[in-house]
Image (cartoon, rainbow, N blue to C red):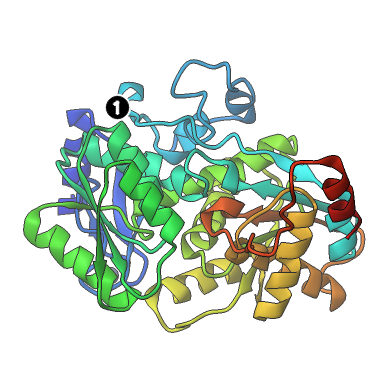
Amino acid sequence: MSAARAAALAASQSGLADVALLRCTGCAAEAPASSRDFECACGAPYDVEHAFRLVGRETFDARDLRSPAPHDSGVWRFLELVYPRFPSEAVISLREGNTPLLASPVLCEFVGIEQVKLKHEGLNPTGSFADRGMTVAVSRARANGARHLVCASDGAAAASLGAYAARAALPCTVLAPAAAHAPAKLAQARAFGAHVVLVRADSERVRALARELAQTEQLDLLDACNPFGIEGHKSTLFELLVQLAWRAPDWIALALENFAHCCAFAKALREARYLGLIDRLPRLLAAGSLRDPQSHGARRALSAIAETRGEVLAITPEQAALAKLAIDRAGLGCDLASAAPLAGARELARRGGIGPEESVVVVLDSHWLGAPSTSLAALPTVAAELGALRSARAD
Ligand SMILES: [Zn+2]
């Protein structure tokens, strides 16, 4: 028996985590499920490898918002798939997930095909997809004995960690690059009680610094590559399958920069197929612009997309802005980065890559309020009388 398997066996007997083990996505080396370090010596991140029990669609169909906690959460509804046998009483939840799958004739017209639906992850508790990963990563960290949580983030993960750390009654530290960050997200993290520190460095360096801090101070790192976070993100796919009565769409469009989503969706599809929950694999479309295609995160995301015979499309800022305008005007709203997948679906349909009879689910990562971008400076302001109001409306 390998050391990792022996440790996994010990962990499962101790009651924590019935996760089989962690496996390196680069060199396939094993690590115990209780490991605090999520990066292999070779530099690649670990993935969680579960020991699944056979579980059918009816288990998940039977649960909804009225189910007892934690099965009322859109993540923990799929407990057997995201963290088999994790103790219910150890779950830290804000009843995340349960996000709507919305049809929009206006956006079908925008893409140029008839079957487009939007999965709006911006409607999670802190306004982004990050909550689905955070509920699992924080639950697991606390059950594993964590005393202080840390993440490097300039956006969604910061606000989400703040909320879940507060829910778990654990202190947390958020490191963000001083030059580029989403002020609304950091303000949110701070409001939840996170210790937010701006660092004069780029996001890559800040991420490395957070890891060093975690290792030297015995803190638990909860960044985007946390393998247990990836497990939580899988629930977005499972939930949309339930919403479609397990009839997988032809395509699922994701933001390319959201590496965690790309990896989680490919992993969830692999596992759903392995367990017989779906009969065929949808193809993943990742759209956006890659800053560093050679990074571990990017290479892993690209291979996840390729695994589904998917497509990767570069989107210009103009195309993304046009898609955001369409989403906002449809009454759904999202931040600019979330609009890239819709722009990608439109571009791929235009090129004939998506057929007119095919169906697409577009995943929106974040709420409009996460990065408000419209100035109110030019709004008409009038005296409080009807005449002035009528002429302002006529303008
Ligand atoms: Zn490795």
Which quarter of the rendering shows the C terminus? bottom right
Q: Which residue is mark 1?
A: 90
Residue 192 lies, in percent from the top left, at: 33, 41
How many labels were placed on the picture? 1
Q: From the viewer's perspective, is residue 250 above or below residue 95?
A: below
Q: Viewed as shown, does residue 179 lie left or right of 96?
A: left
In the image, is 189 to the left or to the right of 274?
left
| Residue occupying the point 26% across, 59% down | 38
On the rendering, which quadrant does ligand 1 occupy? bottom left
- The image quadrant that residue 39 belongs to is bottom left
Looking at this view, name the residue that lies furthest to the left: 216
Q: Secondary structure at mark 1?
A: helix
Residue placed most toward the observer, 253 or 177: 177
Residue 67: give x, y in percent of width and height.
54, 17
Residue sitting nearer the eye, 304 or 133: 133
Identify the residue at horizontal 35%, vertical 31% (top origin): 92
Local crowd at mark 1 within 10 Å, few (<14), some, or many (≥20)?
some
The yes-or-no answer for disc 1 within 8 Å of ligand 1 is no
Asked if residue 250 shows in the view, the reply is: no
- Residue 110 placement, left or right of 88: right
Q: Is residue 112 visible?
A: yes
Image coordinates for residue 289, horizontal then vertical, percent: 58, 78
Position of residue 225 measured from the top left corner of the image (x, y, whole percent) = 36, 60
Residue at 14% x, 41% y is 147
- Residue situated in front as seen by the camera: 192 or 89: 192
What kind of residue is marked 1?
Ala
